[in-house]
Each structure stands twice: as C-alpha cells, then as structure tokens.
Amino acid sequence: MANQICGQLEKLQIFSLKGVQMRTFHITWFMFFICFFGWFGLAPLMPFIRDDLHLSKSQIGNLMIISVSTTIIARLIIGRLCDFWGPRKTAIRLLLIGSLPVMCVGLANSYTTLLLFRGAIGIIGGAFVITQYHTSMMMAPRIKGTANAITGGWGNLGGGVTNMVMPLIFATIVGFGYTKQSAWRYAMILPGLLMWLTAWLYARYTKDTPMGNFDEIGHRKTEKLKTDWQILRDWRIWALTLGYATCFGVEITFDNVAALHFVDHFHLSLKTAGICAGVFGSMNLFARALGGYISDKTGEKYGMRGKGLFLAFMLLLEGVGLLLFAYAGTLLMAIIWMLSFALFLKMANGATYGIVPFINKEHVGLISGIVGAGGNFGGMLFGFLFKSDHMTYIQAFSYISILLLGPHCSFLFLSLAELQVKELLKVTLALFQA
C-alpha cells in the first residue's frame, strides 16, 4: 500500500493531461461515460422497441429490473478484481467482454432474447467501481472526495447524453432508408465500437498506480486475496450502502423510465422526450462534483460526522424534490422540479463516495463494490414499482419519495440529537461556507 500512496496528486489539475495521474483521471471517467452510454442506450428507444416486440408494461419493467440487477453482482466481483488484477486490466477486460452484448442486442427478436441481452449488458455498469478505485489510487486523501465525485459524475453524464443522442442516431439511420424496426438495432453498434476504442486508450495511457502497474511495483496477489472480512462489521459500510441505494438507485431508475414517462404523460415526441430526460443526466456535469467538494471541505473541519450530516441533508432534499416532480401539473414545472431533485440526488452521490475511500484504506475496492452494488440494489427494488399494471409512473415516483423521506428524516433527527448545540451550529455554518 505504501507504493500506491507515493506519487498521489495533492491538487486536482482538472484541465491537464500531464502525468499519469491526470491522464488516468480523464480516461477512467470517459471509460465509465462510454459504459453508461451503452448500459442505457436502449432506454430512450424503448417506445419503438415496445412497439416492435409488442412488450407489455410488466415486461418493460422486467427489462429495467434485470438491467440493474446483474450490475449488483458485477460490482461486487469487480471490486475484488481491482484489488487482485488492478484497475487497468479489469477495465480493459470489462470493456472488451461487455461490448459483445451491447453490439449484439440488435439480434433480439422476442421479449425473452431481449431480456437475456439486457441482463448481459448490465455487467458494464460495474465500470463505476473501477473509476472510483482508480481515482482513489491516483489522488491524495484531501481531494479524493472531489476527484471521485467528478469522475463518477462525468461518467454518469453518459446516462443523460444517451437520452439525447440515441434518438438522433436512430433518426439518422431511418434517414438512410432503414425501417424503425431495424434502426434501433443498428444504433446499438456505436456504443460497442466506442468501448473498443476506450479499451485501447486504457491499455495505452493508464497505470494502476502513480508508481506503475501492480506487476511492476511488486504487488503480491496472494496477499491481496486474504481479505479481512471483519471489516463488514463496520456499520458505516452498510449505512453508505443504504444511502447509495436511495440516491444512485433512484438515478438509474429515472434514467430507465424518464423518456417513456415524458412520451406517455406529456405526449412528447421521442426526440423531445429524450432531450427532457437528458437534461436530468446532464446535471452530473457539476452536481456530483459539487457534492464531493462540499463533503471534502466539511470533512477537513468536522470530520466524518460532518460528512455524514451533509449526506443526510442531501438525501432528504432529494426526496422532497422527487415528490414535487411526481405531482407537477405542467411540463415546465415537471422540468423545474426534476432539475431540483436531480441536483440534490447527484450531490448525495458525490457525498457518498467522499466518504467511501476513508472507511478502510486497505480494502477500497471491496468497499467501493459493496456500496456501488447497493445503488443498483435500490434501482432493482424501485424497478418493481414501474412494472405493475395497477400503478401509474406518477404513483411510483411518489411512493419512492415517501420511502426516501421516512428513514432520512429519522436519521437526521437522531444525528442532530447526538450533537451539542455548539457543534450543530459549527457544522451548519461549515455547510454554507463550503
């Protein structure tokens, strides 16, 4: 571990590609961006896929559930592979293997085959763990939260871009004379090809650590395989896992259903609905980074307690914003409240991984995988609300918001009760000053 700490950056040079640290920083967020693009590439095209394969609402719900369910397992495994192989080899292999179902999903000709391909595509969502692990290896403790939030947020931006871009790619293919039934199938080839390109960039320009790859710095695999499973007794891991389930879990659920919701509820065209849904994802350009930055600044003054309290506030405000979005009566108000809850949701994402690297520095990969899997577990559970024929999307959104508000109000009450008045005032002031 000592070798890994040497050479970590103390200051984030966001517009620089100089040095292996910043090259890795930019390539690893781009890698997750491309994986996210492929992971949710089918979501904005679902209105046409639904008509082509004659899918029911329940079947669409199952497709959404399996797309995030397989990622749970992938994130747990990939966290350990990062500790064992190193993030570089893990990323390259994930990109090459994951590109196959992305490009071949167009071969699906029934609900069953589409379900199998959708599940296989879900493994590339594990790229997030690689991004967080690799960034943690390259950055010093004082900026880990900010750096992790930026790479995670810019990677998640792929979910917004795919909602905007895939309908355009679809329309372009139709413009060349292909049928709509063929166009959605050919459109998915592009994300797969971009994954190949990214695998080459990862192999050519990154290292596992600032000092070199694992096999170059004497990283012993036998030692890394001996995991101290007692770390799982740390309640903070499970608190963060639950918290991430209620922020990132909501995000991937919304990415899956947003375009359909805008088409069905507000009667928008596929292109316009994709733009509206894409605006939600575009908040990742800065919101997740902002959450990580404030978490770092709060942590410098008030430690982990301050970080945890800030995270709880963000989760609470996320729930309020989602409830207001659910009952927005007009498209304009829906977009306004969507942006509001997106801001707090993505700041909560960043605040979560502003804490993760500090739980146990010897098992960053394992803990990142567990917490990351928690996000997908939340997405899987929320997905069941959207498959019911007896529940509208608006009702599903409102139930999720209630689930968010209940436990987080309780957590805030207990946290505030433990703080002395003087400490409370200091932490509150730090949040505003940060």
Image (tube, rainbow, N blue to C red):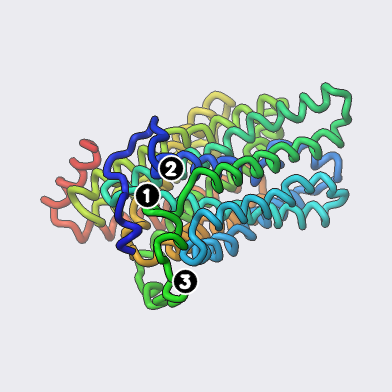
Q: What residue would you read off at disc 3? A: 221
Q: Earlier in the sequence, mark 1 or mark 3?
A: 1
Q: Residue at x 44, y 34 (%)?
A: 340
Find numbered disc 2 in the image and state the secondary structure of the residue it sits on: helix
Q: Earlier in the sequence, mark 2 or mark 1?
A: 2
- Whether residue 81 appears in this view of the structure is yes
Q: Are marks 2 and 1 in contact (CB under 8 Å)?
A: yes
Amino acid carrying mark 2 in the image: Phe
Image-based side of 217 in relation to 118, left or right:
left
Q: Residue at x 35, y 57 (%)?
A: 357
For the residue pair 346 and 297, the one nearer the viewer reads as 297
Nearest-to-viewer mark from 2 and 3: 3
Q: Residue at x 65, y 54 (%)?
A: 122
- Is 12 located above or below residue 220 in the figure? above
Nearest-to-viewer mark from 1 and 3: 3
Q: What residue would you read off at disc 2? A: 25
Alpha carbon distance from label 2 to label 3:
24 Å
